[in-house]
Each structure stands twice: as C-alpha cells, then as structure tokens.
Amino acid sequence: MSQHRPSILLLLAAALAVCLTDSTVPAAAEVPAIAARQRNEKKVFTDAEIVEGFLKTAFGAEYHLAGRVDRIRKYDRPVRVFADGNRADRKVQLAKVIADIRAKVQHLDIAMTDDNDAANVVVKLVRDRELNRTIATFYGQERAKEIRTSLDPQCLSGFRKNENYEIEHSDVILTVDNGDFVFLDCAYEELLQSLGPINDTATVPWTMFNDSVSMGFFDIYDQYLLNLLYDPRIKPGMNVQEVKAALPEVLTDVRAWVAKVNHLE
C-alpha cells in the first residue's frame, strides 16, 4: 500500500459541522488533478462489472479485527456527520463532499451537523504529524502499531455495528495538511467506506476502494456501488446469495438513478 493512499479500519465486534460556504475553498472539480481524472472517467459499465465490484467491497474487510464480514453492513437510519477540528477551510470542503454524496445516493439521508452528540459519523481533522498519536488515542498503542505496520495509513475510517449488522457509529480520521487532492481523495473514500463498503479490492480497476486508484471525487462506478448498498431492498445482515437474488431488480432502478443525476441519458 502506497503511503499516499487512504486506508480503512473495521471495528465489527466493538460493543465499542459545520455547514459552511466559502468560494475561496476549491471544490473537487477545481483541483487540476481531480478535474483531469473526471474528464477521463469511465462511465459505461456492464451489469457484471458493477455486481463484481459491489460484492467485493460490500462483503469482507481490508483490516479485520473481529466479527463476521460475510453480511451486508449499512446504516439503517439518517447519517449525521460532525467535523472535529480547527481548519475551517477543510470543514468547508468536507461539507461539500457530504452534500455531493447526499445528492448522488438516492436513499441515503446524510448531512452535516454542528452537534457532536447528534452525530453518528465523527470526522477528526488532524495534522499529518498527529496522525499516529490520534490513531493510538482511538485504538490503543498496540493496535495502532499493528495498523501502521499493515496499512501505513494517511487517513483512516472504521465503524461499529449491532447484532443486526446495522452500522451504529463511524469514526473517520483525515489529515488536513497534505494538499487539496489528498484531502478530498481521503475524504471521499473514507466517508463512503464508513457507510458500509469497507473492503478494498485490487481486482476492480474502477473503484476508489482499490489502493492503486486515486480519484478525489465521487466517480460514476462508486455511485453505482453506494446506490446498490443503500437501496431499501438490500438490507443489513443479508448474505451473498440473498443479495445476488435481489440485485437484478435493484440494479435496473440504480442505473436509471445514476444516469439521471449524472446526465448520462
């Protein structure tokens, strides 16, 4: 794993913002490296390509601590995101990322909140030199060492779920001082993975959930994956066979939605 790629942490068995606007803070499309990727983005996929990526990311876990990973995990309630940190510019960008996700995932109710107690996703904004110490604060020294050794992360996310595989809380750690591209690339990947598709895969070349792929924006392919996951017919706790049975009907509706919001028709 390159040190420039974000990574994820899955906490399966744990019993364990500010909505701002500021035109001086670049949105994803205003960052040249991201704009170039958007111009060259692949937008046409077969059903088999979409289903393969969904099954590989929605099941399993890149870094697995405990618990079963052979079931669908997702939020079954509104998602509220709190930004914990002092960088107002990064909070602006984070709010834009959340608004973009909200606009492009049909059945996901996600928004920023300025109330930490009301949040079920907490994003910790830290300087790069504080990352390892922050990870240790969250997970303890021994586990933090394992994470650094196995993942060498530049950012991190994890969630805890209940016995019904409903995600109850997610934590995301983002570094704020590695440039706009890294921040946005990390923010999209970690926030989206904290919603359920926690497994990275090296065999699907179109997804940001591939350690060799850097996007910096919410690409078409991953919109398919998140819309499949948050369709009401894909329920927390479903196994692979149950999901495969539901996918043909769900995918038809998801294709129509993704085409509509991205003007692909």
Image (tube, rainbow, N blue to C red):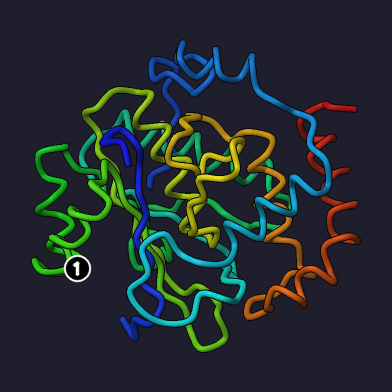
The residue sitting at 30% across, 36% down in the picture is 2
Q: Is residue 187 above or below residue 80?
A: above
Judge left or right: residue 87 versus residue 78: left
Question: In the rendered view of the protein, which quadrant contains the C terminus?
Answer: top right
Q: Residue furthest bottom?
A: 163
Residue 117 found in image quarter = bottom left
Judge left or right: residue 133 versus residue 202: left
Judge left or right: residue 193 versus residue 255: left
Label 1: few (<14), some or many (≥20) within 10 Å?
few
The residue sitting at 29% across, 45% down in the picture is 155
Front residue of this view, candidates 227 and 48: 48
Residue 204: horizontal and vertical position, in percent? 60, 43
SS class, disc 1 = helix
The residue sitting at 26% across, 46% down in the picture is 153
Residue 157: horizontal and vertical position, in percent? 36, 56
Residue 107: horizontal and vertical position, in percent? 72, 57
Mark 1: amino acid: Tyr
Residue 47: horizontal and vertical position, in percent? 83, 47
Front residue of this view, candidates 156 and 148: 148
Q: Is residue 71 above or below residue 113?
A: below
Q: In the rendered image, which residue does mark 1 sit on?
A: 139
Marker count (numbered): 1
Q: Is residue 212 above or below residue 22?
A: below
Question: In the rendered view of the protein, which quadrant contains the N terminus?
Answer: top left
Judge left or right: residue 116 versus residue 133: right
The residue sitting at 85% across, 60% down in the picture is 250
Front residue of this view, candidates 7 and 107: 7
